[in-house]
Image (cartoon, helix red, strand yellow):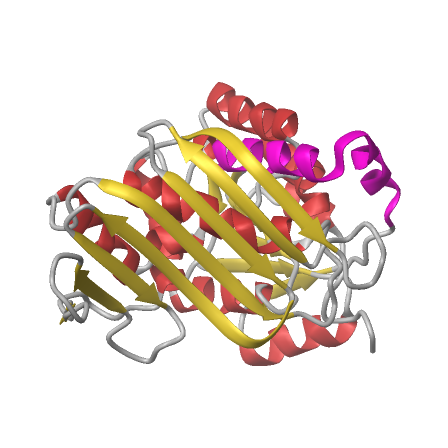
């Protein structure tokens, strides 16, 4: 095993396979940990030289492994990330960093105390079109930002996360905070609906007031038959719409002052897989000691906003969520 292969991955489900693919392509993948024998066999066949294990302790105790990627269900993140940091490993954890704000804060502080990189998989902060939009906002092209709306709607038959909010809304909160360069000040309203009459909401709507005065409306769904991934940012001059379901011209700008909403295409950004850029950023931060764009503070801020929203949705019944028996693997549920 080459010395520069120092990344271990725990969790090789639907998204974990993409993480494995990218770190292997970057010549950094050392070992993959998963509970499923067939999955590990596939890893060995498709990624030559990669070690596999079913035991997380093998990642923790291996001195060749300097960094661990935690790509497991969100309710498992805290214990796994804490163990990795305590073992002196840099950590990349899929969003959200945790499902409790106090746990997210503990992980942030633990990483800082030990001088380790802690990076959260807020993928959209590395999306070329999102970064182009952020540049437009910073350059004043849209004018003063007044309102943001993010719709992330899709079908998910497994529904085994704490709710659709914890599955999808971390993208929305982290992305909006990033592009408008502000943090959530207050969750103004939050509602959730379960179509299966249980405590796992598959539709949520959240309204957040940001510290710079911008109001953001975030809608997420597991039951929408047509995939919709759009971000609207309205300024007092122009509005931008980013539609990530389109193959090209994902980002369009509309003039608010002209009849017919004349659109102006913004093609000048390079199409690179966001996950590749994110994985490269993690390795760069480890090499240089630079704070990740989606570091522990960003992860804590996002979880705090979602926790506040969940408190509004459930009120005094929120504790009942801790009694839900979440499946360990989306890929396995329903098989």
Seen from the viewer's position, the closer of residues 174 and 11 is: 174
Is residue 13 found left or right of 244 in the rendered image? right
Image position, residue 82 (x, y; %):
64, 33
> What residue appears at the point 55 percent right and 45 percent down from the top-left corner?
206
Res 308 visible:
yes
Image position, residue 170 (x, y; %):
52, 47
Image position, residue 41 (x, y; %):
69, 76
Is residue 247 found left or right of 264 in the rendered image? right
Magenta extent: 299-324
Magenta stretch encompasses residue 201: no
Res 4 visible:
no
Q: Is residue 98 above or below residue 194?
A: above
Image position, residue 109 (x, y; %):
53, 21
Seen from the viewer's position, the closer of residues 139 and 79 is: 139
Q: Is residue 104 above or below residue 207?
A: above
Q: Quadrant of residue 288?
A: top left
Seen from the viewer's position, the closer of residues 307 and 256 is: 256
Furthest-front residue in this view? 259
Q: Quadrant of the C terminus?
A: bottom right
Is residue 218 found left or right of 87 in the rendered image? left
Seen from the viewer's position, the closer of residues 80 and 242 is: 242
> What residue appears at the point 25 percent right and 71 percent down from the top-left corner?
271
Q: Number of numbered discs present?
A: 0
Magenta stretch encompasses residue 306: yes
Is residue 233 found left or right of 1 in the rendered image? left
Q: Is residue 217 above or below residue 46?
A: above
Chief secondary structure of the magenta portion: helix
Furthest-top residue in this view? 113
């Amino acid at each position: 095993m080459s010395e520069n292969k120092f990344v271990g991955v725990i969790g090789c489900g639907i998204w974990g396979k993409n993480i494995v693919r990218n770190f292997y392509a970057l010549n950094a993948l050392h070992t993959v940990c998963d509970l499923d024998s067939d999955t590990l066999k596939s890893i060995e066949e498709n990624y030559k030289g990669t070690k596999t294990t079913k035991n997380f302790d093998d990642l923790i105790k291996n001195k060749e492994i300097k960094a661990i990627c935690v790509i497991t269900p969100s309710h498992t993140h805290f214990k796994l990330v804490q163990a990795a940091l305590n073992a002196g490993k840099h950590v990349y954890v899929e969003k959200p960093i945790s499902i409790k704000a106090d746990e997210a804060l503990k992980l942030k502080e633990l990483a800082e105390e030990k001088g380790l990189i802690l990076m959260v998989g807020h993928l959209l902060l590395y999306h070329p079109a999102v970064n182009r939009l952020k540049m437009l906002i910073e350059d004043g092209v849209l004018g003063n930002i007044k309102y943001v709306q993010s719709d992330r709607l899709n079908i998910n038959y497994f529904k085994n996360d704490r709710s659709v909010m914890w599955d999808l809304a971390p993208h929305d909160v982290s992305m909006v905070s990033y592009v408008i360069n502000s943090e959530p000040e207050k969750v103004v309203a939050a509602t959730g609906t379960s179509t299966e009459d249980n405590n796992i909401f598959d539709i949520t709507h959240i309204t957040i007031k940001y510290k710079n005065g911008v109001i953001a409306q975030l809608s997420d769904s597991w039951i929408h038959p047509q995939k919709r991934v759009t971000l609207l940012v309205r300024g007092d001059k122009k509005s931008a719409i980013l539609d990530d379901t389109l193959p090209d011209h994902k980002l369009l700008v509309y003039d608010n002052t002209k009849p017919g909403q004349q659109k102006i295409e913004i093609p000048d950004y390079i199409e690179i897989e966001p996950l590749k850029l994110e994985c490269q950023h993690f390795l760069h931060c480890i090499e240089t000691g630079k704070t990740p764009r989606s570091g522990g503070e960003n992860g804590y801020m996002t979880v705090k906003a979602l926790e506040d929203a969940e408190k509004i949705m459930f009120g005094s019944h929120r504790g009942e969520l801790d009694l839900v028996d979440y499946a360990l693997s989306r890929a396995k549920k329903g098989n």
